[in-house]
Image (cartoon, rainbow, N blue to C red):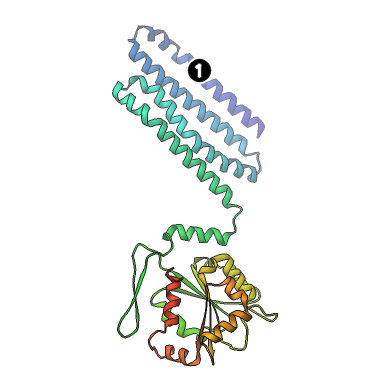
Amino acid sequence: MNLKCHKGIRENFFLIYYIQRLFSPFFIVFQFIPEGIRNMVETCLQIAIGMIIIFILYWVCMEIADIISKDTRDWVKRYLQIAMGMISPFVLQILYWLYMKFLPEGIRNRVETYLPIAMGIIITCITLYWLCIKIGQFIPEGIRNRVKKYLQTGSEVDGQLQSHTAGGHSVAHRDKHKRTPVIGIFSRKSKESYSWLTDHLTWEFDTKTFHLSNRGEWKQTEDFYECTHAILYQNSWWLTISYALDSLYDEDLQFLSTMLGKKNVIVVQDDLMDAGPEAKSIRLRNQPSIENLAAELFLFSVEEKQSLLNDGPITKKLAAMKLIFYGKFS
């Protein structure tokens, strides 16, 4: 392999030597050619010779690459692409300087004005792109997917308006350029337990359901990182949601609040005998972590849930819940 490589390099250098000997008579004739044409031909020859040298160096590198390990080749290839991207603007500028003397003065002055600005923008964009690639390697895949999805779909919802018809049903007036909130419903119960909630939210928002488990595999799914808001749901009146030694939801509530922000997380509990303001105050007093980690606690009695299951008019609680998703609840 080494003998083959040395032989190929020797043959290419001999080729350059013979080309130089072949064109040597033309250099003698050049002195009788007008200066303007001679300068242009010299410039073209310099570029041609430079390109030949580049191709020869490329060929040498390809020959050497055969004896280099694959990992090293991949590493060199990756950084060579970045280097070529950063060098290419300078190559274009060098070519411009070579041909600049042949341009009319008016065009030359205009190009000289805008070329540094364009070069600065190109170099800045390439540098920022490279930095994003390097920093992205240290960010968890789930967060990367969420950022990617956010950039593709636009900024979060803002300014969406909600009104109520005479029958009590809500009507959302949306800006088609705004992103629709994606509501994640998290529970250890079956989907049938909170079907009344999804039925009233799905027609107005994008909803996703997640079954909580001790293994926490839902935290690694792409669907989770598409959610803009979270509902932590429980329908057993006797089980505290948080701030209890036997609580199943304490870690989940903490995680949702950390990832989505307190203002985007709510807690819902239904099938209660008493869902009034006094019952809510007692629960918040006994379970302070709900108030610390969630925007609001919503309690629904058995009667309220049954009414919603029967497609009854939405309650003030459900209307307030939707305002949170629209960012208009305080």
Camera-nearest residue between 8 and 202 = 202
Q: Residue at x 37, y 86 (%)?
A: 313
Q: Position of residue 249 (x, y in %)?
A: 62, 77
Q: Position of residue 172 (x, y in %)?
A: 35, 73
Which quarter shows the N terminus?
A: top right
Q: How many marks?
A: 1
Res 232 → quadrant: bottom right
Q: Residue at x 55, y 32 (%)?
A: 59
| Image vertical order of residue 302 relative to residue 283, above or below | below
Camera-nearest residue between 246 and 227 = 246
User: Looking at the image, can residue 44 be seen?
Assistant: yes
Q: Residue at x 46, y 82 (%)?
A: 197
Q: Position of residue 242 (x, y in %)?
A: 63, 78
Horizontal side of 34 relative to 278 (left or right) equals left
Camera-nearest residue between 103 and 261 = 261
User: Looking at the image, can residue 220 be seen?
Assistant: no
Q: Residue at x 41, y 17 (%)?
A: 42
| Image vertical order of residue 200 relative to residue 42, above or below | below
Camera-nearest residue between 108 and 69 = 108
Mark 1 packing: few (<14 Cα in 10 Å), some, or many (20+)? few
| Image vertical order of residue 276 relative to residue 66, above or below | below
| Image vertical order of residue 19 relative to residue 299, above or below | above
State the SS at label 1: helix
Horizontal side of 102 relative to 250 (left or right) equals left
Q: What amino acid is found at the position of numbered circle 1 in the picture?
A: Tyr
Of all residues, the one furthest to the right in this rendering is 245
Q: Which residue is mark 1?
A: 18
Q: Position of residue 239 (x, y in %)?
A: 62, 86
Res 248 → quadrant: bottom right
